[in-house]
Amino acid sequence: MNRTICFFLILLLFAACTDGNKSRNAEQQAADTALGKAYRQSTLAYLIDGELYFHSFDENTKVKFAEEPEPILNFVFDKEGETLYYSVERENMLWLKSADISKSEITPEWVISWQLIKDNAFSHTGMSPLFYHEGKVIVMHRYHDDSPYFDKMCFYYIDEKNIAQLALDIDFIRSTCSMLPSEEIDNYFEVAEEQLYYVHNNAKVCLTDKIDFKAIEEENGDDSYISDTRHYSYYIFSPDRSKVAFVAEMLENDWVHGPYCIANVDGSKQMALKESNLMVDSKPTWLNNNEMVFRSFLGDLYVANNNKNSIEKIAEGVTDFKSR
């Protein structure tokens, strides 16, 4: 009888443990599913201290990408926004990894070594952002040890699964950020009497006559000024082409920098993004709702809405960001 009772108790304990494991597994699967859903519903992601966060504008919250234990150095999404590519350090070498965030279970995978020594390739320039273009993931780096600038770029060809080193083509890099190619600028823009004009259907519309550039100069100090022969650059149309962002170049000693500005292509709702600067490697990006995200020198991340003449800070300490 005692043996029978003991055996029965063991069966009960085993059943309880099994039910407990099933419950924990179900809870973990539910948590994983919730995280994956949060990733997929986010339209913006950014890096803070090596951790990747997906930002929800609806909830005004951020969710950490929990599947990668190592510090993430840079990242980018494919065209569909479903595959995440990012770099990590492995024995002082830069490696590319990927994760398909469209799946219910997300498992990071090693892709390939960039064949770049992290401490050498980025010690003076800082870490390059990652770029995506037509089936390629691109990282910039420097060839000369004492150079403060990027002068090379490395392509990873996704289908061929190999890499290639090329000389830096800054126009190509700009095109990956949806910037207007230099050969097309004259088709859309003219500068007359220091003002920028958008040219369309044989009509010219001024995009800068309501922006107080003198006030911007004063805020940037005595060493910064916008040249009497004013230059504009870095043109980025919004997804529906109803708005355009551009840089009003400023001079500081021998350095060229300056804020991004936004205007509707009909000339209305002009505003300068005073916290922005063309010197920041992470270039501004449009969201699908025609708001613009940009990062300051200090790593503050902002969202600008020129229709509302508003700029909102949504994160601090950001080193890179991407929309999807």
Image (spheres, rainbow, N blue to C red):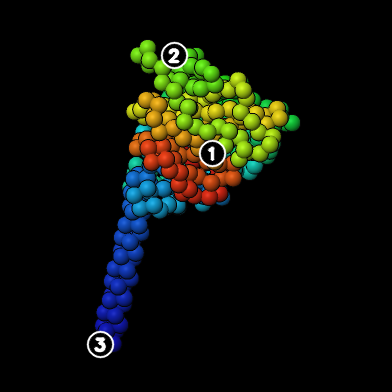
Q: Which residue is under mark 3?
A: 1
Marks 2/1: CA–CA distance: 27 Å
Q: Position of residue 72 (x, y in %)?
A: 54, 45
Residue lying at 37% horizontally and 25% vertically, measured from the top left: 266
Give the residue at x 59% y 45%: 298
Q: Is residue 14 above or below residue 138?
A: below
Q: Nearer the viewer, residue 320 or 103?
A: 320
The tag earlier along the polypeptide, 3 or 1, is 3
* Spot occupied by residue 138 in the image (x, y as percentages of width and height): 52, 29
Q: Nearer the viewer, mark 3 or mark 1?
A: 1
Residue beneath label 1, please?
274
Confirm or deny contact between disc 2 and disc 1 (CB under 8 A).
no
Tell us which disc is closer to us: 2 or 3. Answer: 2
Answer yes or no: is residue 52 visible.
no
Asked if disc 2 and disc 3 are in contact, CB closer than 8 Å, the reply is: no
Which amino acid type is marked by label 3?
Met
- Marks 3 and 1 sit apart, C-alpha to C-alpha, by 84 Å
Q: Secondary structure at mark 2?
A: helix
- Amino acid marked by disc 1: Lys
The quadrant in which residue 170 appears is: top right
User: Residue 117: percent from the left, percent from the top?
Assistant: 65, 36
Q: Quadrant of residue 129?
A: top right
Instruction: Choose mark 2 or mark 1, whichever is in front.
Output: 1
* Residue 289 vertical position relative to residue 57 in the rendered view, above or below: above
- In this rendering, is residue 62 above or below 79? below
Q: What secondary structure is found at the residue carrying circle 3?
A: loop
Identify the residue shown where x is 46% and y is 20%. 197
- Judge left or right: residue 228 versus residue 159: right
The residue tagged 2 is: 187
